[in-house]
């Protein structure tokens, strides 16, 4: 689901940035008005949750892998605008130190995972939950929201990749049409990753709100505190499961996610490396590429260590952004 540098051209990632810049501005404006001090840890933990859940690479058809995102959970718990900021923070930590997703394509990845997915998930959730939510309805609404959100995000990624031959011509980027890209992305997300996303989202949401309604999170300090504790438990459990992101692909002989290949893999697949990808793929040299410690391949132990480091960094970034927005909101209210 992460588009690397070089996989889409400036016409695509430029438009994505043009969309996301006002979206980030709007999200900050909304949160300056609505974010309370007690909600800042929820925003930060939402970012950390998304960072760690994306470690869970699962084998799909074609000897490839894919992963859940967690955007539906964050949108349900904190609202779509806070989710947009939280997921953008997680994607930034993934891209800059670890090279998971690009710098030029950061806007496109945020468009797909931090905007399209949480807002669609939130809309679906609100449509299903109704005015008198029960625990059963909460589970169903969360599951459907997570499922539809990730399928929609995968479709957006496929369309952006599939547009490249039409925009830049053959030989510049991946030679897949929109139809082929949609088929390759949608089938595994509809059949495998979507159900996993649904189960994670519904299970986490119903655990977080097992004794109180999600409706009161923003209004009752005690509820907000219990949500923070339970969301932290969910994030810790997922962190302990991160080695599965290495073990499952090894056990099933699965490789990289679709359209996240390196130059060697591209040359093996096509006999050449598309010009645009060859030019752009090394735009950013991440200090810890592919979540592997220097001089070592990723192993279950190193993934757990890197996961802990990345989760801590994401949590810190989320707290910093939340406090910055909150203080700006206080200044705006005082002026």
Image (tube, grey):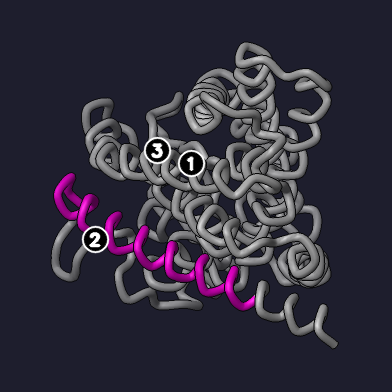
* Secondary element type, mark 2: loop
Q: Secondary structure at mark 3?
A: helix
Q: In front: 54, or 157?
A: 54
Quick one: label 1 or label 2, which is nearer the N terminus?
1
- Mark 2 surroundings within 10 Å by alpha-carbon count, few (fewer than 14), some (14 through 19), many (20 or more): some
| Residue lying farthest to the bottom in this orientation | 335
Disc nearest the viewer among 3 and 1: 1
Q: Quadrant of residue 269?
A: top left
Disc 3 crowd, CA 10 A, few/some/many (<14, 14-19, 20+): many
What residue did someone put label 1 on?
Answer: 226
Horizontal side of 281 relative to 178 (left or right) equals left
From this view, report whether residue 69 is shown above or below residue 260: above
Q: Which residues are magenta?
A: 298-324
Our reading of the magenta stretch's main secondary structure is helix
Q: Position of residue 5 (x, y in %)?
A: 55, 67
- First reached walking from the N terminus: tag 3 or tag 1: 1
Residue carrying label 2: 292
Query: Between tags 1 and 2, which lies in front?
Result: 1
């Amino acid at each position: 689901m992460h588009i690397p540098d070089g996989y889409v051209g400036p016409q695509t990632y430029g438009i994505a940035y043009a969309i996301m810049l006002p979206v980030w501005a709007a999200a900050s404006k909304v949160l300056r008005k609505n974010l309370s001090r007690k909600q800042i840890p929820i925003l930060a933990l939402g970012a950390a949750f998304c960072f760690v859940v994306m470690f869970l690479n699962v084998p799909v058809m074609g000897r490839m892998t894919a992963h859940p995102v967690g955007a539906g959970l964050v949108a349900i718990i904190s609202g779509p605008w806070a989710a947009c900021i939280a997921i953008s923070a997680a994607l930034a930590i993934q891209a800059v130190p670890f090279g998971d997703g690009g710098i030029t394509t950061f806007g496109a990845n945020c468009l797909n995972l931090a905007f399209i997915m949480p807002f669609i998930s939130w809309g679906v959730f609100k449509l299903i939950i109704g005015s008198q939510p029960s625990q059963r309805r909460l589970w169903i609404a969360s599951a459907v929201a997570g499922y539809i959100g990730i399928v929609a995000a995968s479709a957006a990624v496929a369309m952006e990749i599939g547009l490249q031959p039409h925009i830049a011509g053959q030989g510049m980027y991946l030679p897949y049409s929109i139809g082929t890209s949609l088929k390759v992305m949608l089938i595994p997300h509809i059949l495998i990753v979507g159900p996993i996303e649904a189960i994670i989202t519904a299970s986490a949401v119903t655990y977080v709100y097992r004794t109180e309604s999600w409706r009161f999170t923003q209004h009752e300090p005690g509820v907000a505190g219990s949500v923070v504790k339970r969301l932290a438990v969910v994030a810790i459990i997922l962190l302990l499961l991160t080695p599965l992101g290495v073990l499952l692909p090894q056990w099933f002989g699965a490789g990289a996610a679709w359209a996240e290949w390196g130059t060697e893999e591209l040359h093996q697949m096509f006999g050449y490396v598309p010009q645009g990808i060859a030019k752009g793929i090394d735009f950013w040299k991440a200090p810890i590429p592919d979540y592997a410690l220097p001089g070592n391949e990723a192993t279950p132990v190193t993934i757990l260590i890197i996961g802990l480091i990345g989760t801590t960094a994401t949590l810190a970034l989320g707290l910093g952004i939340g406090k910055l927005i909150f203080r700006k909101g206080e200044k705006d209210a005082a002026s």
